[in-house]
Image: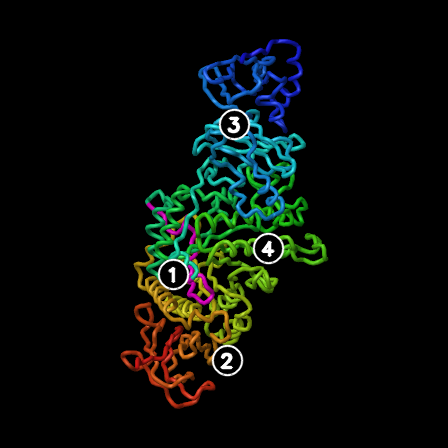
Amino acid sequence: MRSTYEHDESEYRYQQHIDALQQGCFKDPFSFLGAHKVSANCYEIRCYLPGANALQIVIADTRYAAVQIADSALFVAQIDSAELPQYQLNVNYSETSCIQYDEYSFLSTLDHQAMYLFNEGSLEQAYLHFGAHFVTQQGVDGVRFCVWAPNARSVSVIGDFNCWQRSRHFMRFHPASGVWELFIPQLGVDQCYKFAITSYTGEVLEKADPFAFKMQQAPGTASILQHKAAAIELDNVALANREARNRVDAPVSIYEVHLGSWQRQGEANHYLDWRGLAENLISYCKALGFTHLQLMPISEFPFDGSWGYQPVGLFAVTSRFGCYDDFRYFVSECHKANLGIILDWVPGHFPGDVHGLHRFDGTHLFEHADSRQGFHPDWNTYIYNYDRPEVRSFLIANAMYWLHEFAIDGLRVDAVASMLYLDYSRKEGQWVANQYGGRENLGAIECLKQVNKRCYGKNQGIMMVAEESTAWPGVTRSVDQDGLGFGYKWNMGWMNDSLHYMQRDPLYRQHHHHEMTFSMVYAYSENYILPLSHDEVVHGKGALIEKMPGDDWQKFANLRAYYAFMWAHPGKKLLFMGGEFAQRKEWDHDHSLDWHLLEHRSHKGIQNTITQLNHLYTSTPALYEQDNSPAGFAWIDNSNARQSIFSFIRYAKHADDFLVVIANLTPQVYHDYLIGVPQPGCYQVILNTDQVEFFGSGVQVTNAENQQVMTLTSPCHGFEQSLSLSLPGLATVYIKKVRHES
């Protein structure tokens, strides 16, 4: 073999290509760059190497000089050979030289079946095909890059490995799928990169990788090369535990956390990292008796003030708390502790950051072009075009990524109502009806159905939770029965009504009695979670304790009574951090919770109340087994508005296993209060939120030291038997029949 290239006028035939390469706009680089057979016994190798002074083609132990064309960065060599073996490039720069492979000597490894599914809207593990992956190709280690940008004029990979030059690593375009891909040899972990996308108008957009596993923390905007570890595998015991704790007939008590402000450390107010959170947060949740931990969004997001609800890197764990492996450690520690872990997931919208999804290839690729469909007026964000199959593949794959790769318990889907309705938060004339003239977003509905069906179908024992605030029917009905397919729905109606009631002066609560009873009219229409979430303690709403009326003692008594009413009401439980010890200040994402408040008996009493409620809840089947069945609840008296007393019974699956609940939501203490009960015998007070250990006044429900009481044969509330009790003011009590072993 020998190099035979000579200077002649034929070099001018390269000028058009050189111009395109210099402009960073080259749609079909493999048709020109790399090795091309020009005759039966001759190959021509063309390399575009900005900044290079000289190039040699290295084949085995022989080097062949390439010719630099017209003082450009294009180098050409002709090799006399009928077959061209693998070759390398010896590139000389002004101050150094290096041996490297030619990116354009590698074949495409695009999986065309996967691309078909992606274009169809059903590629569940798109993250294995798109993005940046460390692979070995033709015996060489490197990174395969792949990105969807069907309307781009050209796409190149830029990064710190090529001095961010968009004229260096042009990608191969696959017109059938709209996908660009390129294998770049010899790259290393933690190198930064982006895609330089030239639109058809000539605009150059530098975009982060939508499928990146790691991204720079703000103000950085680059994606970072990251190995994807093997998926976390749960053994049979862990799978059984996950399935058991997420069932609709299981006790589910969720502690919602914003990781950046739960607990900070030192005078510098630093975040706890994932390992610190594993040590402190998990043990804290377990000590308080919570069954699940829910994390506000942890996908990479640029703006702290968005709390994670405006993510840019949906597949990247935020770097605020450490690396990818540290998060895996945190999840594994949750599994060891049998603590469920739920992540907030945001498929409803995305921000307009220039490095993000907005106008990704110079067109409205991920969002609708019509602002009446593609722009969210409340949040100044962009709405996914759910009608586009590739967008559905992107979102389905993202949901599957968190569930499959990290074996978490589930996803809480944010702002579902904004996805379902085309006229959400829009006035007449500001929205576009669907093909049938309705206001339902048919694409979003189908996307949510597919997400839920596929996630449940491929991940045993998970839960999918909808934050949905309207009366949309069948949110937790299966997709096969024309439901949306969620496992649970937040009960926003209960939250709004009950909080409005509790904020009222007890003197006037009698006129709003229905606010505490109306939720039972629709309690079984969905599988509900009762949420007291972060949304109730921000934007001037104040902390939960400050919503309560009265003097300081009454505020704490009201809150304890309210929590106990909530824990006894049908539906799973969710409480935002700080609520468990009555954080005084409204939540501030920039500062730690006020842990010093636990030095005060009043705040410690609230924490003791939550701990006791969780203990009773998880050990009392009547409080959870029949949350979604009318057989699990019966009013004793729901009409005592004058005294603002609510009383009801919770039943387990075995009807003889029941719990009597009485809430007195006025400061008045009532002695000799008769309450009807379904069976005669001895009853035990198992909770009284007025106990001294909770910072209560210590009024005893019964006269007996052991807080037991026998039934009277005095009919009351439709029952043949009754109990005579003292009801403490602003308190909720739980009473259970004593079962004597035979």
State the separation of the CA atoms marked 3 and 1: 48 Å
Task: From the viewer's side, name the closer residue of 550 and 291.
Answer: 291
Residue 561 part of the magenta-drawn span = no
First of labels 2, 3 by sequence position: 3
Q: Which residue is mark 4?
A: 418
Q: Which residue is mark 2?
A: 639
* Circle 2 crowding by C-alpha within 10 Å: few under 14, some 14–19, many from 20: some
First of labels 1, 2 by sequence position: 1
Residue 715 versus residue 224 in the image, above or below: below
Q: Quadrant of the C terminus?
A: bottom left
* Amino acid type of the residue that numbered disc 3 sits on in the rendered structure: Trp
Residues marked 3 and 1 touching at CB (< 8 Å): no
Residues marked 4 and 3 touching at CB (< 8 Å): no
Residue 99 versus residue 218 in the image, above or below: above
Q: Position of residue 245 (x, y in %)?
A: 42, 61
Task: From the viewer's side, name the closer residue of 294 and 330.
Answer: 330
Task: From the viewer's side, name the closer residue of 279 and 645.
Answer: 279
Q: Which residues are magenta?
A: 244-265
* Circle 1 crowding by C-alpha within 10 Å: few under 14, some 14–19, many from 20: many
Q: Which residue is mark 3?
A: 164
First of labels 3, 1 by sequence position: 3
Q: Position of residue 358 (x, y in %)?
A: 60, 41
Q: Which residue is mark 1?
A: 290
State the separation of the CA atoms marked 1 and 2: 33 Å
